[in-house]
Structure formats: C-alpha cells, structure tokens
Amino acid sequence: MAEGNQTVVYLSEQVVVLGSCALSFAGSSLIILTYILWSDLRTTPRRLLVYLSVADWLSAVSYAYGVWRVFRTDSLDCVAQGAISTFANTSSFFWTVAIAVYLYLFIVRSSQRVADSLVWLFHLVSWGVPLAITVAAVCLNKIGYDASEVSVGWCWVSIHAPDRVLWMLLTGKIWEFLAYLTLPVLYILIKRHIHIAESPNATMVENEEPGKPVERKGRLTVVLVLATLISAFGSSFQYGYNVAVINSPSPFMQQFYNTTYMERYGSPMEENLLTLLWSLSVSMYPLGGFFGSLMVAPLVNKLGRKGTLLFNNIFSIVPAVMMGVSEIARSYEIIIVARFIVGICAGLSSNVVPMYLGELAPKNLRGALGIIPQLFITIGILSAQVLGIRHILGNTTGWTLMLGVTGIPALIELLLLPFFPESPRYMLIQRGDEKTAKKALQRLRGMEDVDAELSEMRLEDQSERAEGRLSVLSLLSQRSLRWQLISIIVMNMGQQLSGVNAIYYYADSIYATAGVEQNDIQYVTVGTGAVNVFMTIAAVFIVEASGRRLLLLCGFGICCVSCVLLTVALNFQDSVTWMSYISISCVIIYVIGHAIGPSPIPYVVTTEMFRQSARPAAFMVAGSVHWLCNFTVGLVFPFLERGLGSYSFIIFSFICLVTLIYIWLVVPETKNKTFLEICRMFAKRNKVEIKLGDGDLPLKESKESLEDAGRVTAF
C-alpha cells in the first residue's frame, strides 16, 4: 500500500485532465466512425490511423477512469487501469512511428508495395511489444499506485517497485523518447522530398534532352537482397557477437581458468596472473582484428571479394570448435589463441563485407546497403547479450556452447554464398572478365540492359590505367588520394576514440546507481543493445535521403553533447537524486547518436572515396586504424578511468568535437555519386587532375557534384 506517499489531487487538475481525455475520446471515436461509415476513405494510411485511434481511445478511457476514481492504494481496478493505460500508451507511440515510416516509404522511396508489405510487421510490433511489456509488468507486480508523483490520480509503475526507473522507461518513456526523435527526422525527409518534387526544375531533365534515355534507378532484387543478408549474417554478425560474447560469462570463464590451473599445479592462480590471462583473452580479439586488416588487400586482390569472405570462414569455424572444446580439453590457452584467430576473422569481415556490398549495390542504394554490415554487427552484439542472460547460456554449463555458436553463421555463409555473384567491378576492372561481370550485373539488377553501368565501370578502369595501378605502400604517397586517406583515418579514429567502449563500461554502474537491481542490469543492457539495433535500422532507411555527411555530423554532435552532460551527471548523482536518471538518458542518447552516424557511415564512405585499385589498400589502412584504436582504448581506458574518473568523458567529447569539425570542413556529400565523380570532387583539394585514357569520352559530372566540391574546399 502507498498510504504514506499520497499526493493531493486538486479539482482543477481533475477538470483539465478529464477535459483532455474527453477531447481525445471524441477525436479518436470520430476517426474510427468515419472509417467505418465511408468506404471511400478506407486506404492503408487511414487504416493505420484507425489503429492509432483505437490505442488513443483506450488511453483516454483508462485515464478518465483513473482521474475520476482517484486511487489511494494498489487495488485491483488500479492495476487494471494501469495495465490498460500502459498498453495503450506504448502502442500509441509505436503506431505513430509506424504511420510515419509508411508515409516515408510511400512518398519518399516511392515503394507502395514495400510499404504495404510491412503492415503485418507494424501489427506485430505495435500490438505485440506493448502487450509483452504490459503482461511482464503485471506478472512481476510492477503496476500499481504511483502516489501521483508522475501522473494525476491514476496508476502506473508502483511506487514500491525497487527498479521503478527501469519500468518507467520500459512502459513508456523510452518509446516516447524514440518516437520524438524519429518523427521529426521522417517529417523533414518527407517535407524535403515534397518540396523537391514540386520544384519547377524537377522535370527539366526530360524536357531539355528528349532524345536522351533517362538513367534507371537501381532497385532491390532478390539476388541483391540475399547476397547482402547472407554475407552480412555470415561475417559481420560474428564481429558483433564476438565483441560481447565474453562479457556475461566472464566470472565463470575466470573460474575455469583458476580451476584448470589448480588441477595442473595444485595451488590456486595468483590474482595478478588471472588478471593478465583475462586481459589477454579480451585483448587478443582486437589484436587479431588488426592482423586481419593487414590481410585485406592481398586477399581481396587475389581471391576476390566473395572468395575472401568464403576463405575467411576458416578463421571462424576453427576457433569456434576450439572454444567449444576448451572445457573438455581443460585448457584456457586454447581460448586465448582462438580469440586471436576469431579476431582475424573480424578484421577481415569488417572491411571486406562493406567493400563487397558497396560494389554490388547501385549508387542510389549504396549507402543503405553499406549500413547493413553495421546493422548485423549490432544484432550480433544484441544476440550475445541475450544468450548471455543467466537463465540461457550465461552460466557455468552454457558458456562453452555460447562461445562455439559463432561457427554457425560461418557454416551457413560457406554453404550459400557460392551461389551468388562476385563483385562485377572486381571481375571487369581487376580481372578483365567483362562477360562474367555483365552476367553478374544482370543477375543483381534483375534486367538485361546494364550497358550504362558497364560503361561507367569501363571509364573508371580507363582512368585508373592512365594513372597506373596502386600498391598498398604507394597509397600513402599518392597525392591524388591524400585527403581521402586523411579523411578515413580521422573518421575511424573518431569512431573508436569517441568513448563508445567507455560508455558501455560505465553503463552497469550507472544503472545500479539509478536503483536497478543487480540481477536486472543484464536485461537493461539487452534493452540498450535493442536501442542500438533500432537506430541502426533507422539509419538504413534515412541514409539515402539525408546523406552521409549529415548523419556523421549529427552523430558526432550528439555523442559530444552526451559525453559532456554525462560528466556533469556522474559528478552530481551522489548528491542529487534525479541526476542518475539524467545519466541513464545520456547513455541511451549517446548510443542513439553513435548508431546513426559514427558506427555505420565510415565504412560506407571508405567504399565510396576510393576507386577500384585503391579500395583494398584503403580498407587495409582504415581497418588497421580501427583495430589499433580499439586495442588502445581497451588498454588505456582502465588507467584513464582510475586517474580521471568520470572526467575521462571530457576527453571523448573533445575527440568527437574535433572529428565533427574536420567532417564539416573537409568531407563532401557522396550520396548518388559514381566513384569517379567522388574522385573528381577531391581532385581540387588534392590539386591534381583525374586523367582519362586516350579516345575516351569526357567524364560527365553533375552540377550537384561540382557544388559539393566547391562547398568543401572553400574554407
């Protein structure tokens, strides 16, 4: 009961809230009745609006009952009213976002078929997730009288719940925040598209050159989608999975290390030795990633992009077996060696998959497909977090199986990827096999006429032959690629040194300070991983409309501000009670910011900034920087945290700010540009000219490309 925590509910408050409930009830009822009575209005968008109105109708009724009733205790009708309002409110947020996503796909992407096919998914998420949350909250006795601290007279999260903040987030606040973040972005993109469509210049291309064929936009085909999903699941998923797989079972793994040592030598392992062995188990993974990055250029040039991905599965299946049998073999050395080998797999896959997909995708889908690897990395992290829950595999008996699961995606890729085409650019430009390249393009595009794209590849090939092929070492001294190389180094350093690993390191203590029970922190961590996945999915949909540069600027800006606010919140959360809630918000906002820009976009931009012969060497450099910085942060941050505490986030905010300024001044927008156009955009900054082979047609460049080049060289 909450007898000692009651708050006076004034009549004026009741009148205002009941009035708003009446308006909401009337509006929702009107929309539902209009849809039922007039068949002409029964379109899919209006049907989605009806589902939103049903949720709002339930919300209005439950709120009105709560305000009229004015609860004082955790009575049965209090719990029922709280459950209905929780379900209706959460569902309302989901349906609002669903309508915005539908309109975005329908208006901006011109994909009514795709939008209509997602309606069933909208139902599953918008009804299913709120129902699951509500049932869990009721079964765990989290719904009850809240002493009117947040609401006026109705019930929500019980004031007696020790992890009240967590359930306030789960039953509404986190979904409300995500809705408020997503809706303005989609609204701006839709508004911008409508403005461009209504512009008198929108149809100039057809009117100016009626005899010239209009360039076809690339589309998603079955072959392209399956090649993307199989390569990303078989390779990128493992990168993310192995990042997080040892976090949850670490106590049991260290216990195994100690027990094995004791069986061998008859005495327990010293604490310093155990710390050293565990540090090796963790750090061997990024070290392997660094060596894997060094192998990128020779392998992709010799075996091709697809061939390298197939070969790379060796570095996943072998360590998966090694880690799976480590307990039976009574050897912790096997785990350390296996972590190094699987790190090689991650180093290769983190570079080769974006390269492969960037070369498969048409230029208008290159950004969206380029983010898919990062999406599967986040799904891999989330999968490891879910499997690491104590009741699943994060326990004494399940941890070896959890480590060995990484081999399953590799086996699937090894069986299925051979049926899909090699990169057409690799086949034409590096192997000189135009016939195979044309067949691959026809399969990927789903049409016979691919001559325009083949011509663009030939032009790139001729340009590269005029300038000469690049080796890995000559890339560093190539003047025509100087600013591209500096840009990918800065972006990859910014990505890893922006504090993302430190945020995850601090997250558990932040949640504990906010009142989350120790046993429930693992579920909150899973929730954070889910937010990461959700925002990466959002980035897939908006990258082609908003562009790469805007997402990078917004992402690093959000991370910079979040780090500053988190520093303040961590320093005051012991003296100011509500500061712990600010800390949780900062963690979530940081994860959102990193997921939309710094995490996925550097891979996309690395693919786009370099032409065919330079791309493998560029990915080798970018990957090496990525993994070296990852290794450095893991090595240095514990000492940094010990010396500076929460003030270490000021360093990360400064790095985010410096990276943001560099991107603002130097990095151009690359969406919807050919690889050769992007090189021309950098040519002015590099003070070189892009040469073409003798007898070639002059390179055409869009007015937009020239404007972008001018904008980033004006400072």
Image (spheres, rainbow, N blue to C red):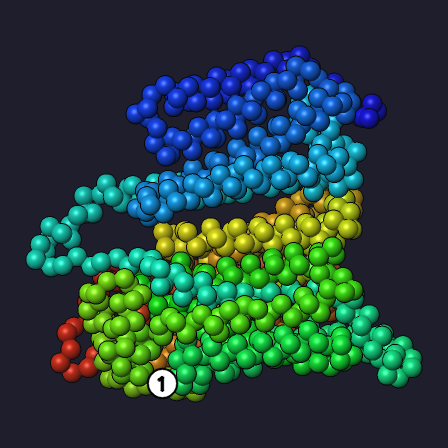
The x, y position of residue 344, in whole percent, is 57, 78
State the image quarter where residue 291 is shown.
bottom right
**Disc 1 residue type?**
Leu
Observer-nearest of 579 and 603: 603
Q: Residue at x 41, y 83 (%)?
A: 303
State the image quarter where residue 319 is shown.
bottom right
The x, y position of residue 626, in whole percent, is 54, 72
Total labels: the figure holds 1
Q: Residue at x 36, y 63 (%)?
A: 224
Q: In the picture provided, is 281 more to the left or to the right than 596? A: right
Q: Residue at x 80, y 72 (%)?
A: 256
Q: In the picture provided, is 91 more to the left or to the right than 697? A: right
The residue sitting at the right extreme is 267
Determine whether the residue tagged by mark 1 lies in a helix, strand or loop.
Answer: loop
Residue under label 1, please give it.
470
The x, y position of residue 76, in whole percent, is 74, 23
Observer-nearest of 654 and 42: 42
Q: Residues within 10 Å of mark 1 (few under 14, many from 20)?
A: some
Q: Residue at x 27, y 62 (%)?
A: 446
Q: Quadrant of the N terminus?
A: top right
Q: Is residue 463 above or below residue 525?
A: below
Residue 599 seen in render: no
